[in-house]
Each structure stands twice: as C-alpha cells, then as structure tokens.
Image: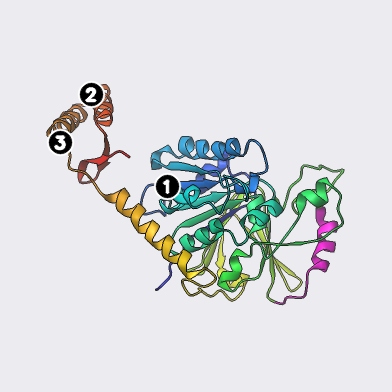
Amino acid sequence: MVLRPGLITLFGSGETAPGTQKIYHALFSQLAEPPRVAILETPAGFEPNSDYVAGQIGAYLCKRLQNFRPTVALVPARQRGTPFSPDEPALLQPLYNANMLFMGPGSPTYAVRQLAGSLAWHVLRALHRLGTHLVFSSAMVLASSRSTLPIYEIYKVGEELHWKPGLDLFGDFGLSLVLVSHWNNGDGGELLDTSRCYLGQARFGQLLALLPDDPERRVVGIDENTALTLDLAAGTCVVRGAGAVSVMHAGTVARFEAGSQFDLHLLGNVQLPAATAGIPEAIWEQIVAAQVQAHTARTTLLAPDAAALVLLQERTAARERRDWSEADRLRRQLETLGWRVQDTPQGPQLEALG
C-alpha cells in the first residue's frame, strides 16, 4: 500500500485567537471535501470542564470558518479505566468519519499517560497514514514529542528539572523531535522569563543538557499564535501566523518566519513507514473497515421523492428571481423532509440528512 499521510499542523498557542482564522482557512482549503473535524478531549480529560474546552474550539471553527460548512464531533476520550476511556471502541466512532483530528490544551504528561499504547492512539496514527489531517496545539504539541516537558510539574509544582517520555509521533517517520510550544511566551514581563513554554531560557538550557545524546535530535520551538504544517509526503514545512519557528540542531539555531517554507529534511531523514508498522494487524483491519463503512454511509444518497424535487425546483426559481427569503424558506422546508441542499457548479443537489 502506498501511503499519502495527511498534513500535521502544530500550533504554538492561539488555536482560537482571532488571527488564527487565516491558518484554518489555509488548512481547510486543502481538503477535498468539507471539513469533518473530530476533537478529542484527552489532553484536558482531567479537568471537569474538558467538554467545554473542546466545545469552544468546535464553536470557533463553526462560526469563524462557516463558509467551509465544517461539522464538528466532540470525542470525550478522557481517562482510562472509566466509561470515557481512549480504549473504548464505541467512543471512537466519530474518528472514522473525520478528515481532520484535533487535540489541544491540557497537560502533556496526562495526555501521554492516557494515550500511550491506547486504541485511540493506534486509530489516530492509522487514520493519519490513510490521509486524515492532524492538528495539535499547546499541550498536545509537547506530548507528541520523543521526550516531553512536564510543564505543570516543574513550573507549577516545583519538581526538579526532568523529562518524561513522549508519544513520539514522528518516530514513525524516522524523525527525533522535541517539540516546544509557547516558545516566545512573554507573560512574565521584565521580571520573569517565561519563554520556552514558561520555563525560561536558563532552565531550558539546563533541561537540554539532561537529554541523552542523540545526533539526530532536533528541538523545534513554535512561537505563540503561530503554526507549523508538515507535509510528510511532499517533504515540506510551512510556517503561518504571527511569529516564527526555531529549529535547534548540533549547536545551531535556524529561525523561520511566518510565510516561509523549508525542506522537511532540516528536521531529519524522513522516511514513510510501512502501512501497519507499529499498529497491531487486527486493529489496522478494523480501522480500514470502519473508515470504508463511514465513507459508504457518507456518500450514499437516497433518491429524493417527488415532493422534494418540486420544492427544489421552486427554490431554484426563487434564487433566480433573487427572492432570498423564499429560497431560505424552501431550504428549511426541504430540511424538515430530510434533505440538505448543496449548491454546486453543476446546479443544486439534494443530500440526505443524517
């Protein structure tokens, strides 16, 4: 099987900031179909309001990107050993119908504990290899590293400087990456250096010295309100937003401003894996079957009855005479009959709701 992995977009922060709309616009424009976004609550699953956190992101996409007609599904895969476990198959069904998966704020170490080796993580990696786009922000950017920063433990609790194993998403592609969001954070003002994801440059330098020797490792710092999009198949990286992306390797730092593009090989010797590498065969087969089933259900159109066709003709006539209120009334009437109107270059078409 020839893989064409989806894009991976990493936000340093600002996934719902006003200016971020342009970044999503660029990402949505590259989808062959209207965006179907599944948002996993996992990184914030320890918070009582994780559904609200995910819901705010969904509301942002639906409001600010309404021209793309996005649909959003919230996936409450919050904690192992509960009914809302990332190992619960029924909970993960919305993932198979999505063409974009999102995970964002929360705790990176919590996200690693809940996702490492989980069914949700296997599904996410498999769907990505099959073309689904991934969008991570903030805590989930940290969690997807080979080694992750325990930000809460160090910055909030005061534990000694240390690293935790990450989910190592990019290890599947031959890359050794340490990803750091909030790279240029300035919340501390002149009194406290909170760059490098709130730890400051001095402490971050000490942390780098604690990492094991790895000549292939790159440290990738992503500024706030900035996104880095990696196209693993094309071998390119694009920086969008308000800031820049910094790549540290072998004592050098390369900085790429928003609007720039650079070769993916600057992050290492990228290699596309075998389709099922690192994913249990039985799970892979289930994932492929579930995605085919979701595609069939999504694209199967029922034959409209005579009443629906008459209403569609009346709506078309109303639009031609610019009677927009009547056209909207007829559209709503069609929806009550179970039909959505799609205005295409070939003319209006009816699609069954649900």
Tag on residue 36? 1
Q: Nearer the viewer, mark 3 or mark 2?
A: 3
Cα–Cα span, label 3 and label 2: 25 Å
Cα–Cα span, label 1 and label 2: 31 Å
Q: Residue at x 60, y 48 (%)?
A: 42
Instruction: Identify which amino acid the numbered label 2 is placed on.
Output: Asp
Report how many numbered discs are placed on residues in the image: 3
SS label for mark 2: loop
Q: Image quadrant of residue 264? A: bottom right
Residue under circle 3? 305
What is the x, y in percent for residue 321? Answer: 18, 26
What is the x, y in percent for residue 275? Answer: 46, 71
The C terminus is located in which quarter? top left
Label 1, residues with CA under 10 Å away: few <14, some 14-19, many ≥20 = many
Q: Residue at x 45, y 58 (%)?
A: 132
Q: Nearer the viewer, mark 3 or mark 1?
A: 3
Span colored in magenta? 200-215
Q: Considering depth in this image, is 243 or 130 the residue closer to the camera?
A: 130
Mark 1 / mark 2, whichever is N-terminal: 1
Label 3, residues with CA under 10 Å away: few <14, some 14-19, many ≥20 = few
> Is label 1 in contact with label 2 (beta carbons under 8 Å)?
no
Residue under circle 2? 323
What is the x, y in percent for residue 146? Answer: 67, 65
Cα–Cα span, label 3 and label 1: 28 Å
What is the x, y in percent for residue 222? Answer: 66, 55
Scheme of colours in the image: rainbow
Q: Residue at x 57, y 52 (%)?
A: 86
